[in-house]
Amino acid sequence: MDDIPRDSNKDSIWLLESNIDDTTGEALGFTMEKLLKQGAKDVFFTPIFMKKNRPAYQLSILCKEDQVNNMESIIFQNTTTIGIRKVKMNRTILERQKRRINTIYGPVQVKICKFKDREYIYPEYEEIKRICNETGLDFQRIYNEIKKQ
Amino acid sequence: MDDIPRDSNKDSIWLLESNIDDTTGEALGFTMEKLLKQGAKDVFFTPIFMKKNRPAYQLSILCKEDQVNNMESIIFQNTTTIGIRKVKMNRTILERQKRRINTIYGPVQVKICKFKDREYIYPEYEEIKRICNETGLDFQRIYNEIKKQ
Amino acid sequence: MDDIPRDSNKDSIWLLESNIDDTTGEALGFTMEKLLKQGAKDVFFTPIFMKKNRPAYQLSILCKEDQVNNMESIIFQNTTTIGIRKVKMNRTILERQKRRINTIYGPVQVKICKFKDREYIYPEYEEIKRICNETGLDFQRIYNEIKKQ
Amino acid sequence: MDDIPRDSNKDSIWLLESNIDDTTGEALGFTMEKLLKQGAKDVFFTPIFMKKNRPAYQLSILCKEDQVNNMESIIFQNTTTIGIRKVKMNRTILERQKRRINTIYGPVQVKICKFKDREYIYPEYEEIKRICNETGLDFQRIYNEIKKQ
Amino acid sequence: MDDIPRDSNKDSIWLLESNIDDTTGEALGFTMEKLLKQGAKDVFFTPIFMKKNRPAYQLSILCKEDQVNNMESIIFQNTTTIGIRKVKMNRTILERQKRRINTIYGPVQVKICKFKDREYIYPEYEEIKRICNETGLDFQRIYNEIKKQ
Amino acid sequence: MDDIPRDSNKDSIWLLESNIDDTTGEALGFTMEKLLKQGAKDVFFTPIFMKKNRPAYQLSILCKEDQVNNMESIIFQNTTTIGIRKVKMNRTILERQKRRINTIYGPVQVKICKFKDREYIYPEYEEIKRICNETGLDFQRIYNEIKKQ
């Protein structure tokens, strides 16, 4: 596994998972926001079907090793779960830089990733949203205009 | 729409739907059982994603017109929903008969449907389960053995 | 369908649906916010699986009849969909009132629904969130404390 | 509902639905292909959770009124379902034209939709796929290059 | 990872997973029950979309190391899967005790968890269900009444 | 973990996962096909719900260790993801053989698995599909006929 692709980095990340069938969707949405504010790299819900005909959700969190305890505390305090399982995973991430580019909407922040011989430009979501609100134009148009530059 | 396939019947059915983000999976499982006991033709949950990052479930019920009010009462009393939407749908159903057939496991009840020139035999789930429990054999084996007869 | 439950009202609502396999999740999240700001009663996404191995989402909107055209414009402008289907549904909704009640956290707004002989009290989500942020306490605790009053 | 947006058309479409818990995923994939070959406008699967802890799928078909009977026959013959429900829905679709445009990869077929004062250009999926296979380049690059033209 | 939260325990658990596209929902529901009866800590289904347009389910089992072989046997015998993958995960679980408390419905068993400076009380599902059946009252009411004590 | 069931083998497999909220379903379907052509053992999508109300999909790939780098390159080039996480999992797989058997439709290839004292026969999907196309008969009939032999 040592021959990682050029322009990418290798690190590790913890995946925390908990199956939740006795917390409401409202409380789960609140918990997601709290986990993200406290530094979780990513938080997501997966629909699952549990015993006794219970439609439920799996709460998943990606975080660094030194955040695991803090994340667990937030989960135990804001949901009714009593168990969290976790595993350390390898990760490959592309090198990325934030850069400001000039567009017809003024300067816009984008994320630039390199992989092998190519550069990929991803407009930042919050920037597109800001321009949509300022101009009244639609998401697709702004996104495509910025990518063209 | 009058030229319905031979061997099938045409009737109508009500579909009731409610988006639920503030009831737990436990309570939803309980509500499903209650709706079925009270005569719902079918009850099912569909995972949906609602505003404010809320993972939720849509509760759907199929029932006859004279059951609609009763179903609505059960939903309002056992979940936290405050609105139920519904639509009357056309339905095509195959004629089916229950019949007892002889198998190596003794007499077994099956459902027989006719469509065009063919008969389809579906072993009843509860019968397969009973035989699995009595014999210790597995689901696939019993299911296939019965279908062969 | 005339014998509706006491304490509930009967009206109608339009359900708009569109299957979307060529718009990103980012753009869909943006579109949801826009639809809600423009007055949609509810907006939600359902995971679906389409032809050619395409994992996709169904966008669903509930709105009043006089909002249908406006909702359609937003969808056509912010997603890549080229078709929207819709159906008018009956709806039963509980009568509800907003009321301020006194709690150990000060006055709190709740929603009160009546159904048959009972009153159901639902704390408003934004109120719980506000108290969580002010007190640093967790969602479950605040929610349960308010329900007790 | 008569004041439809400019550049869009109004027609109607049938939605057929069936909950399937006793057919395998393999057979469902086969059935989807068959329905599409026979002229279904769209076919998709939605994960649903049914009684007795059964993870299942809802099969949905969109088709014209004169196709309904044929679609039902295919479903009854290739799955184990014994009931299909359906509803006629209104539909708004954008006017679209297929046009060949010149790109750095040669002539490419695209779909052009008009809505209000704008033209939207959607590269045809099969064209992108063909160019990916011919050039060895990746999907995102081809898609974006064509949109730029 | 050694500084685990107070009042919680650290152990490990095996997660077994299998993607299943050629077993019916009926057989999967049966298999879930069998796995739980044989001592699985948890069993759940996740909707997944596989190649060749196959809507499918991932079967997941959480169990102790000495149960892994038995669980695998049940899966191989009751489904059509031919491969099971698995990983050992760390787990944090809250200390919990079962306790009988007095309520207006008589003595009721609850689960009490401690985390940091707080006690969390979770009514047992089977107890709520029993009281619902005995009294004819609804799930939400019983659940909330017991939590209040 | 050494006492593996008879007739099964033990090896290991890598699971690669990536959460994707800024790639379209079209591009994901294309990527799945590419990954399978390049030797992935399995590729599947799981619906997940991410922050900022984004309905998304988790892309999962099962592959051998020497394929990991190649799979990562395909993902980085065809989707907009910038991070892939992965974990090595143990795996138990049944011994299987391909065998041609004679049926009323001529020779047909099947997969035969042994587990404990039993042989399980699974008709190959592509064979069933071929026979359906040749004979015009339906999937269920062909599948069951072949299993009977």
Image: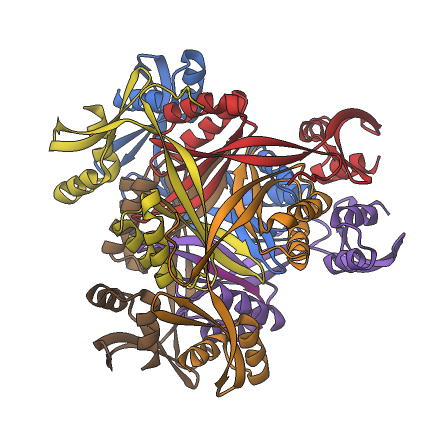
Chain colours: A purple, B yellow, C orange, D red, E brown, F blue
Which one is nearer the viewer's eye here, C36 or F109?
C36
Depth check, front residue: D63 or A22: D63
Q: Residue at x 44, y 81 (%)?
A: C145
Image position, residue D19 (x, y; %): 39, 38
Q: Quadrant of the C terminus of chain F?
A: top left
- Say above or below: A56 vs C89: below
Residue B15: x %, y % from top left: 41, 44
In-image side of E38 versus E64 (left or right): left
Q: Residue furthest left?
A: B106
For this orientation, the residue located farthest to the front is C2
Q: Is residue D108 above or below residue C75?
A: above
Residue drawn at (16%, 45%) of the image: B133
Magenta range is A57-66
Q: Is residue C125 above or below residue E34?
A: below
Q: As rendered, which of C61 and C141 lies closer to the eye?
A: C61
* Residue D117 forms part of the magenta stretch: no
Going 28% across and 58% down the picture, which residue do you hit?
E66
Res A120 seen here: no
Q: Quadrant of the N terminus of chain F?
A: bottom left
Please tell me whether the stretch drawn in magenta is mainly helix, strand or loop.
strand
Query: Is residue E80 among the parts visible in the rendering?
Result: yes
Q: How many marks?
A: 0
Image-quadrant location for residue F118: top left
Q: Using the image as rendered, state which of residue A41 and residue D117 is in the foreground.
A: D117
Q: Position of residue A122 (x, y in %)?
A: 76, 52
- In the rendered image, residue E138, in percent from the top left (x then y), is placed at 30, 65
E101 sits to left or right of B21: left
Residue A63 in magenta stretch: yes
